[in-house]
Image: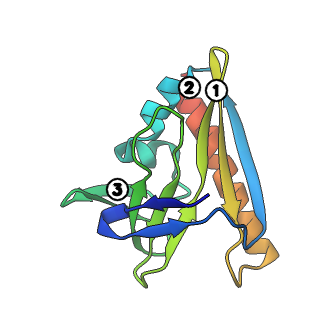
């Protein structure tokens, strides 16, 4: 299966092949999936629930930018959909595009959010673990924010 996406005018092709190790991080949220999706899919909400990604976001010229601990990156979600797909793309200053698979899955009146952390080339075991731990903390924060 081939998936094509155009974040910020840039064509991205993802053929579904796995080239690295993955870690699926999930959090159960006691809210309907459509509510979780609506909140999490709004880039303006990222600093409230994903401080591991960055502490501020800005929309400029129809594109979203996130100030990460390392640098300012362009951020783009997959197009809005009814399937709970929150895949997103981070475009670094170098031009490298990082693809992050993410889903909101309905479970009766609740939901589960699953984000796949992928080990990038050159990433050490400690860096991979830290990345996954940061995602777990962000998803736990999303749960707290939405269940308040």
- Based on the displayed image, in which of its 4 quarters is residue 26 positioned? top right
Q: Secondary structure at mark 2?
A: helix
Q: Which residue is mark 1?
A: 111
**Mark 3 and mark 1: Cα distance apart in space:** 26 Å
Q: Which residue is mark 2?
A: 33
Q: Is residue 61 left or right of residue 55?
A: left
**Mark 3 and mark 2: Cα distance apart in space:** 24 Å
Viewer-nearest residue: 41 or 68:
41
Viewer-nearest residue: 7 or 135:
7
Residue 35 location (% of width, % of height): 48, 24
Comes first in the chain, label 2 or label 1: 2
Residue 112 location (% of width, % of height): 67, 32
- Based on the displayed image, in which of its 4 quarters is residue 71 positioned? bottom left
The C terminus, quarter of image: top right
Residue 23 location (% of width, % of height): 77, 57
Q: Are marks 2 and 1 in contact (CB under 8 Å)?
A: yes
The residue sitting at the front extreme is: 1
Disc 1: CA contacts within 10 A as few (<14), some (14-19) or many (>=20): many
């Amino acid at each position: 299966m081939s998936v094509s996406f155009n974040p910020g005018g840039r064509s991205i092709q993802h053929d579904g092949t796995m080239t690295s190790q993955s870690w699926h991080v999930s959090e159960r949220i006691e809210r309907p999936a459509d509510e979780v999706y609506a909140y999490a899919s709004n880039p303006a909400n990222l600093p409230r629930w994903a401080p591991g990604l960055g502490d501020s976001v800005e929309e400029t010229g129809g594109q979203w930018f996130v100030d990460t601990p390392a640098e300012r990156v362009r951020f783009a979600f997959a197009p809005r959909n009814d399937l709970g797909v929150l895949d997103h793309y981070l475009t670094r200053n170098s031009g490298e595009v990082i693809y992050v698979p993410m889903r909101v899955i309905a479970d009766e009146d609740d939901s589960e959010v699953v984000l796949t952390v992928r080990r990038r080339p050159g990433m050490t075991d400690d860096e991979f673990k830290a990345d996954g731990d940061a995602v777990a903390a962000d998803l736990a924060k999303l749960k707290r924010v939405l269940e308040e």
